[in-house]
Image (cartoon, helix red, strand yellow):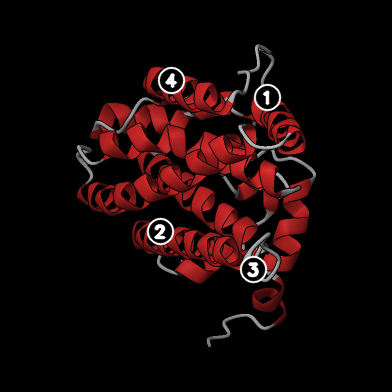
C-alpha cells in the first residue's frame, strides 16, 4: 500500500462514517417519535452530511485526478467503503438509534479533540469544526439514554436491549486499521485505542444516571474499516446510490 493510498483511505474512513450515519439518521425524517426530535435527528444528519462533504472533497483532492466528492460518495462498491460496522446498523426503534449515536459520540469526543493536533492541516481544521458538533450530538444522545433508561419499565427495557444488541459493534472503535497506524506515525493522528478510557468513563457516568448496565461481553465484530461489512450495507448503498448510478454525473 502506497503512502498516497493510506492517506486517502484514512480520510475515506472518516468520510464514510459521516456519510453512512447521516444516511441512517436521515431515514428518521418524518418518522420521529415527536416533532422536536424528528427535527433534531434531521439536523444531526445534516451535520454529518456536511462533514462527509468536506472529507470527500479533501480525499478527491489527494486521490486520482478524475475523482470527485460525488464519485467517492456514490460510485464505489460496498467493499471499498471503510466505515465502522456500528454506523451501518439499522435504526431499529428509537432506543437503538439513541444507543448507536451515544456509543459513537462518546468515542468521537476525544478523537476529534486529538485530531485537532494532527500534522495534517486540513484534517485538523475539519476536526476543529467537528468537535463543536460532536459536543451537541453527545449531549443529545446522553440525555435520551438517561430519559429512556430512567423512564418507564418499558423504556428502560428497550434502552437496555438496544445497548446489549449494539455492544458487540463497539470494539471496532478501538481497533487500529493500517491506514490509521500510518497516519498516526506520519501525521500524529489519534490512536483509537487511546480513546477507550475516556469512552468508558462517559459510559459509566451516563449509564449510572440511567440505571443501565454496561454489557460484559468481550466478543466483538469488526471488518468495516477494511471493507468487510454487514448484510445491511448493500441495502443502504442501493438506496443512497440509485440516482447517481442511474444518471451518472447528474447535478441538482
Q: Which residue is under mark 1?
A: 168
Of the two numbered discs 1 and 2 on the same chain, state the one appearing first in sequence.
2
Q: Residues within 10 Å of mark 3 (few under 14, many from 20)?
A: some
Marks 3 and 1, the one that precedes in the sequence: 3
Q: Are marks 2 and 3 in contact (CB under 8 Å)?
A: no
Q: Earlier in the sequence, mark 2 or mark 3?
A: 3
How much space separates mark 2 and mark 3, taking CA atoms?
19 Å
Report the Cα–Cα distance between label 3 and label 4: 32 Å
Check disc 3 and report the residue beneath it.
29
* Residues marked 3 and 1 touching at CB (< 8 Å): no
- Seen at 64% across and 46% down, the residue is 97
Q: Residues within 10 Å of mark 1 (few under 14, many from 20)?
A: some
Badge 4: how crowded within 10 Å, few (<14), some, or many (20+)?
some
Q: Nearer the viewer, residue 80 or 111?
A: 111
Evaluate if marks 1 and 2 touch, with contact meaning CB atoms under 8 Å apart. Answer: no
Determine which residue is flagged by label 2.
51
Q: Earlier in the sequence, mark 1 or mark 4?
A: 1
Circle 4: element type: helix
Whole-Å distance between the Cαs marked 4 and 2?
23 Å
Q: Is residue 214 above or below residue 12?
A: above
**Residue lying at 65% horizontally and 26% vertically, measured from the top left:** 167
Label 4 or label 2, whichever lies nearer to me, is 4
Amino acid at each position: 500500500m502506497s503512502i498516497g493510498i493510506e492517506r486517502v483511505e484514512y480520510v475515506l474512513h472518516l468520510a464514510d462514517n459521516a456519510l453512512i450515519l447521516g444516511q441512517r439518521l436521515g431515514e428518521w425524517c418524518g418518522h420521529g417519535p415527536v416533532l422536536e426530535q424528528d427535527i433534531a435527528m434531521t439536523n444531526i444528519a445534516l451535520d454529518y452530511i456536511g462533514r462527509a462533504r468536506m472529507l470527500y472533497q479533501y480525499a478527491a483532492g489527494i486521490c486520482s485526478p478524475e475523482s470527485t466528492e460525488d464519485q467517492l460518495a456514490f460510485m464505489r462498491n460496498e467493499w471499498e467503503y471503510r466505515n465502522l460496522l456500528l454506523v451501518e446498523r439499522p435504526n431499529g426503534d428509537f432506543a437503538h438509534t439513541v444507543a448507536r449515536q451515544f456509543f459513537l459520540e462518546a468515542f468521537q469526543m476525544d478523537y476529534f479533540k486529538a485530531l485537532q493536533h494532527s500534522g495534517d492541516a486540513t484534517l485538523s481544521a475539519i476536526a476543529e469544526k467537528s468537535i463543536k458538533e460532536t459536543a451537541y450530538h453527545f449531549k443529545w444522545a446522553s440525555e435520551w439514554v438517561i430519559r429512556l433508561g430512567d423512564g418507564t419499565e418499558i423504556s428502560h427495557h428497550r434502552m437496555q436491549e438496544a445497548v446489549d444488541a449494539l455492544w458487540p459493534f463497539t470494539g471496532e472503535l478501538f481497533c487500529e486499521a493500517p491506514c490509521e497506524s500510518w497516519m498516526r506515525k506520519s501525521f500524529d493522528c489519534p490512536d483509537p485505542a487511546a480513546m477507550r478510557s475516556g469512552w468508558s468513563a462517559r459510559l459509566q457516568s451516563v449509564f449510572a444516571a440511567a440505571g443501565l448496565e454496561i454489557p460484559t461481553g468481550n466478543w466483538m465484530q469488526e471488518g468495516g474499516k477494511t471493507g468487510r461489512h454487514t448484510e445491511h450495507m448493500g441495502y443502504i448503498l442501493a438506496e443512497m446510490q440509485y440516482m447517481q448510478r442511474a444518471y451518472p454525473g447528474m447535478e441538482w
